[in-house]
Image (cartoon, rainbow, N blue to C red):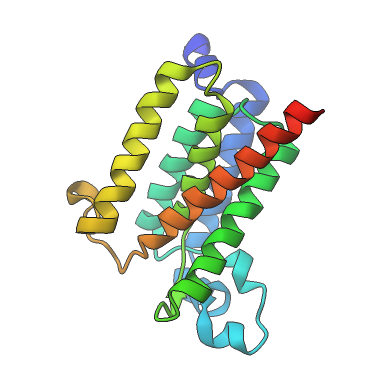
Amino acid sequence: MTQLLKSLNCDGRNGLSLLAGAAFVMLLAVPAGYMREHFAYARGPLQHGEAWRLVTGHLVHLDLSHALLNVVGLALVWALYRGAWRLGEWSVVLVTGMLAIDAGLWWLQPQVQWYVGASGVLHALIAAGVIAQWNTERGICIVVAVLLGAKLLWEAWHGALPFAGESHDVVLSAHRYGAAGGILAATALTLRRKWL
């Protein structure tokens, strides 16, 4: 069991960090209605200066099942890519992913009035992880890159994946914007590593 946890980056402090992140996401989902009302990405309140929503909108969820899906996604990213970047670099990916989603929704999709959830940011983390480990784990990176690309293309042409269940008004374009932000951040970080 210890070897399995270690192989999934879930042993010791890694496991506690993942557990803390998952608990945080789930805790925020409990008062879902309140959280959405005051912290969701919402065009009207943003126009009136509530800029915190550009960050908090990615932490708020529709309900517990929505939050649980994002926790499962976080665990998958953690298992695959925990060591791909240092903490500061992951922070750059995270912020760039959020900014890409916010900018894409604000300027390219003004019809989107509100957005909640971390799935777009998770797409940023996955894309950045693939780029970070391309030279060391090419086989798994090719599989993940093909699956991610196929998922994004399917969503662009056909909507939510068939097994995704009820879509809950999912803003699928946030996944594309997030992936683009992850690619941008990872490319910049890779070039920085080479220069240093």
Residue at the farthest right position: 196
* Percent coordinates x, y for residue 181 in the rendering: 55, 51
Q: Position of residue 182 (x, y in %)?
A: 55, 45
Q: For the point 43% across and 60% down, which residue is it? A: 174
Residue 172, placed above or below residue 112: above
Q: Quadrant of the C terminus?
A: top right
Q: Is residue 47 left or right of residue 79?
A: right
Front in this rendered view, residue 58 or 32: 58
Q: Quadrant of residue 147?
A: top left
Residue 159 place in picture, x, y as percent: 23, 59
Q: Is residue 11 rendered to the left or right of residue 177?
A: right
Foreground residue, 26 or 56?
56
> Seen from this angle, which residue lies furthest top?
3
Residue that appears at 26% across and 62% down: 167
Name which residue lies at 61% across and 27% down: 84
Is 170 placed above or below 81 here?
A: below
Q: Residue at x 50, y 31 (%)?
A: 130
Q: Is residue 71 above or below residue 103?
A: above
Residue 29: x and y in percent read 48, 61
Left or right relative to 189: residue 35: left
Relative vertical location of residue 159 with respect to residue 137 in this rendering, above or below: below
- Number of marks in picture: 0
